[in-house]
Image: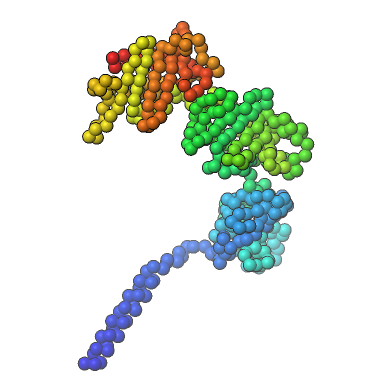
Amino acid sequence: MRGLTTTIVLLVVLGGLVGYIYFVDSKRETPDPNAKPKAYAELKADTIEELQIKDPAGDTSRVQKVGDDWQLLEPVKADADDGVVGTVTSNLSTLEVQRVVEEAPADLKQFGLDPPRLDVGFRLKGQKDFQRLHVGDKAPAGGDFFARRADEKKVILIPSFTDSIFTKTPFDLREKSILKFDRDKADGVEIVKTGGAPTLFARTGTEWRIVKPATARADYAASEGLLTRLSSTHMLKIVTENGGDLRTYGLDRPSVTATVTAGSSKATLLVGKMSDDGGYYAKDAARPVVFTVEQALSTDLGKEMAEFRRKDLFDARSFSATRLELRRGSETLAFEKSEAGGKTTWKKAGGQDADTAKIEDVLTKLSNLKADAFQAAAPPSMKMPAAAVTVRFDESKTETVTFGRSGTGVFASRSDESGAATVSAAAFDEAMKAADGLK
């Protein structure tokens, strides 16, 4: 009986062991029989600390990781483009050998490897010496490239797409932002054009306003787009690292100056005259380097203030409005929104029920009114308004828009903006016709 018990125990243990082995094996990834070997089997991208690339033109670049960022050390010292460098290191770590061409070639010149067309060196953390990948000519068939590790004799083929990834010039590897600032903290932008008054934008939370040369609401998309252009535009090329005589580039008296503020810090871009390649010379005021930018940037920065203004006359919408007041001559109509039992109703100022559908129709037509153009001063007709509309919305915000007629034209002005806007007479009349239905 004791022997039988022992046998049963051993069978249970054996069954558990078999089950465990099966469980572990089932979690292992099955090797892909078609997978190609890696050029550097144990290499991990995050262990690379330094890169050195000699491109086909003979220019040598060297970048080194400092903390979490990459720095360009040769041929000049500058910030490196972390994204571009990261692409190089990740592709080195995953580089596949398409096939071995020759184990011990007697002549490397036939492959474009003596000397190599491209030399990519990398140094790992804790190591002094560089490992090197030499890349030669394109193979006659298939488009892949001949290559070899400097510490091995054999010639291999590497994928065609990796050649453009590894072929990087000093300019390719450097950080190419035209202006450096924290976009999320930016709270102001000032644009100054030659001979013109400054245009100043200010942001509070998510709201943009034009502060100079006139006070007005700024269009959110246009203002954010301007900030994005300044933060994301890249240099086209480096003209000089040391600045020199700025008159050569029209930067002593810039055609446009753009300054981004973030609290007490400032970043200023100077745009000079047109360069020979159709771009514009430009310079970050905090750095000596002169570079070129695309012509479109100069065009965007040179836009008139009106192109950055909000065209909607009302910020309120039918769903956000809580009070509506219309004044026309001696007549005033006022309505309040109320919520009860999950139902929205509108009431007249005296407490009587109002037609909710008609009020929302008026609000919709008012919110659809847009400025066709702007002018610095309000016309005399605004002294005798055709209508004045006050809307409360989002619980605590209030806006008032006054309308006037002059001949066949309709003008509008907001209490929080200077000047006036021209408005479609047909759209205004349609809104007033809807308002007549509220009497």
Residue extending furthest toward the front: 350
- 420 with respect to 152 (left or right): left
- Write the residue at 56% across / 63% down: 44
Residue extending furthest toward the right: 245
- 347 with respect to 381 (left or right): left
Q: How is the image coloured?
A: rainbow
Residue nearer the viewer, 231 or 21: 231
The spot of residue 200 in percent (x, y) is 58, 30
Residue 98 visible in the picture: no
Which quadrant of the view contains residue 358? Answer: top left
- Write the residue at 44% across / 10% down: 384
The spot of residue 391 in percent (x, y) is 38, 24
Q: Would you place residue 228 above or below residue 371 in this image?
A: below
Residue nearer the viewer, 429 or 99: 429
Of the 4 image quadrants, the one containing the C terminus is top left
The spot of residue 1 in percent (x, y) is 21, 92
- Write the residue at 36% across / 32% down: 395
Q: Would you place residue 230 above or below residue 357 in this image?
A: below
Residue nearer the viewer, 218 or 271: 218
Which quadrant of the view contains residue 282? Answer: top right
Residue extending furthest toward the top: 407
The spot of residue 433 in percent (x, y) is 33, 14
Residue extending furthest toward the bottom: 2
Which quadrant of the view contains residue 376? Answer: top right
